[in-house]
Structures are given as C-alpha cells and as structure tokens.
Image (tube, helix red, strand yellow):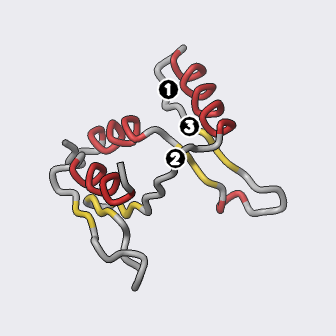
Amino acid sequence: MSWKDTERAIAARNEAGRRNPVSGRGGQADVEWPGVAFEVKHRRLLPRWLAKAVSQAVQAAAADGSLPVVLLHEEGRRHDNDYVIIRLKDFESLLKGRGGPTA
C-alpha cells in the first residue's frame, strides 16, 4: 500500500471524509473529516517502542473500559505541546460519542 492509498483509506473511513490530493502546501491537511485535519504519515515500520507503549495503554485500559492513550513528552518542553496518541478505532469511537459522523 502506498502513502496515497493510505490517505484514501483514511478518508473513506468517514462518510464525509475527503483526501486533499495536493496537500503539504498552503496549510492543507492530507485528509479532512468534519472537525478533524489529519497529517498522515505512512511508514514501512513504526518504532517498536511506540507499538509497545500503545499495547501497554490498551492492556491498562481494558481493566475498566478506559480510553487507551499514550502521551509523549519531550524533556524540557511545555506539557501543552505534548503529543497524545490513540488508536484510530478509539478515535472513531470518541467521534461517535459526541455525535460526529463516522463510517
């Protein structure tokens, strides 16, 4: 699967999703859903430590049905610039919970 195919697949997961074929210029997102601007990064492999962190979050959340989240913080940076990583299916569930359109 190419990066273009990945962008198309993400756009198709939401009935109102749209892929911008010429993104990266002029501040356009790769894929847009209502209220969401995706910058899609397609890689052959993601870092193993990231996959392990997600797995740990999923395992911890399973006990009480919480949302599994990985928070990434860079030393010396403000916490309001930290990154929040969640699985796409969990993100879609959040959107459904607030009444947003999902496929």
Looking at the image, is mark 2 or mark 3 earlier in the sequence? Answer: 2
Secondary structure at numbered mark 3? loop
Residue 100 placement, left or right of 83 = left
Q: Which residue is mark 1?
A: 66
What x and y, as percent, mark residue 32? 29, 63
Report the residue at 76% width, 56% height from top: 74
What x and y, as percent, mark residue 8? 26, 55
Report the residue at 30% width, 54% height from top: 5
Residue 15 placement, left or right of 24 = left
Q: Nearer the viewer, mark 1 or mark 2?
A: 2
Report the residue at 46% width, 54% height from top: 42
Q: Amino acid at mark 2?
A: Arg
Q: Which residue is mark 3?
A: 69
Q: CA distance from mark 1 to mark 2?
A: 30 Å
Q: Which residue is mark 2?
A: 44
Q: CA distance from mark 2 to mark 3?
A: 23 Å
Q: Amino acid at mark 3?
A: Val
Q: Are marks 3 and 1 in contact (CB under 8 Å)?
A: no
Secondary structure at numbered mark 1? loop
Q: Amino acid at mark 1?
A: Ser
86 or 10, which lies in front? 10
Q: Are marks 2 and 3 in contact (CB under 8 Å)?
A: no
What x and y, as percent, mark residue 29? 37, 70
Q: Nearer the viewer, mark 3 or mark 1?
A: 3
Dot 3 crowding, Cα within 10 Å, few <14, some 14–19, many 20+: some
